[in-house]
Amino acid sequence: MLASLTPATSRPPVTRPLTRSLYAYAVAILSEVSAETQAKARASGADLIARAKEGVEEIQPSEAAVELDGDDAVLVDVREQHEFEERHIEGAVHVPRGHLESRIEQFVADRSKRLIVYCASGNRSALAAKTLADDLGYEDVTSMAGGITLWRDRGLPVVTPRSLTQEQKERYSRHVLVPEIGLEGQLKLLDAKVLLLGTGGLGSPTALYLAAAGVGTLGLIDDDVVDASNLQRQVIHNTERIGMPKTASARKTIEALNPDVEVIEHNLRFGPDNVIELLSDYDIVVDGADNFPTRYLLNDASVRLRKPVVSASILSFDGQISTFVPYEGPCYRCLYPTPPPPELAPSCGAAGVLGVLPGIMGLLQALEVVKLVTGAGTPLIGRLLLFEALGTEFTELKVKRDPDCQICGPGAPQIADDELGKFPDYDLFCA
Ligand SMILES: [Zn+2]
């Protein structure tokens, strides 16, 4: 048996040193045979392509471009998904060669239609064209010589669609799988600029989840430092960060979570002198303020600048949230034309708070932001959602725009450009 496998040119076994075992000799011969078989397989692969090219019409890229201008032919890209995503010819339908038989009919049902097939270099497209013509009955199939490589070399245009990097594809794969978000929604999230007013009880969970979701730019406004009493609810901070500015602490956590997010620290006090400038750079504002002057100031500025605000607040075991999109729904002042008297408006600093509650409300805010950015679902515009934590009860109230609203009502005074950013002394509202 071994003898019959021995090629005529191989070393005769009798001349081999006796130390060489028969086993090693057999392995050596078999590997030679296997190399020969592989060479044969390579040759037959090349033959196959050559034969396909002989039996299939080939077209030059410049001719294909002229035909495609005429709009009569269908251009079929048979490369793999990642190749198509990197670049392709405009208007091409994408049917990877491995899915040709099962998918081509979805794109081209009419078998008399002229098909121009292309790949990277013209080989796979020749094989695909042969399959389309011989096995699938397409009557007028041509393969583009040289593929998209030659097409580009000839100076013809290609489309390079925007996509996610390989790392981003893995990181956001569970978003991309959700039809309401998908690749398009994820790209919108990556482009979004969201400003968070406060990185405390509400801002902490909101910032964490928005960062995880891949919101590309997060602005953080806070002039406070991390205190031990914050850690019972402000989960973006930690024990080691006590004494550190909250914006810096939040930034560290966000950057460790998701390097895609650019964090912009606004380690300052939000006020009439900086509100317009701060809001101007962002698409959406998340209101996690803990005092009424700030809420009114934010509302009035956001209506003037037409920036949506996702607003939540908590008091003892109650939380509430709404989304204010200027002129689409009511504004904060439509709901609360005047601030409550000071005795009814304790801040979290003075009153106790159940740590989980701002977590829940902050995450509802993050959810609203994702919906506003991606366009998925129905945001809380014109709806005030109340949450009572002890009974675990949600209540929804419909809220309408107030025609007499001094800020967004039709009778609201027009604000001249030089008056923008000039607000009454909001500090007078609160004791
Ligand atoms: Zn209003």
Image (spheres, grey):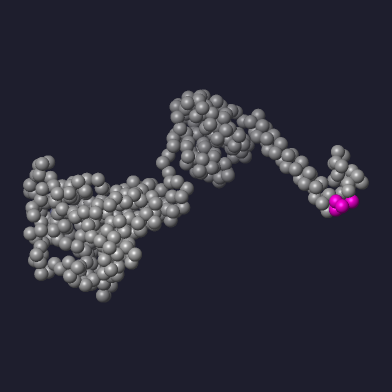
Instruction: Give residue 355's quadrant in the image.
Output: bottom left
Residue located at (16% from left, 58% from top): 295
Q: 422 or 373: nearer the eye?
A: 422
Q: Is residue 304 magenta?
A: no
Residue farthest toward the bottom in the current orientation of the protein: 390
Q: Main secondary structure of the magenta part?
A: loop
Q: 188 or 202: nearer the eye?
A: 202
Residue located at (67% from left, 32% from top): 51
Residue located at (15% from left, 53% from top): 271
> Which portion, as a residue range, is magenta?
18-22
Q: From this view, report whether residue 271 is shown above or below residue 114.
A: below
Whether residue 406 sits left or right of residue 3 in the image: it is: left
Whether residue 186 sits left or right of residue 392 in the image: it is: right
Please state the horizontal and vertical placement of residue 225, each as a whole percent of the image.
Answer: 25, 61
Residue located at (19% from left, 71% from top): 351
Q: From this view, report whether residue 292 is shown above or below residue 74.
A: below
Q: From this view, report whether residue 209 is shown above or below residue 388.
A: above
Whether residue 88 sits left or right of residue 4 in the image: it is: left
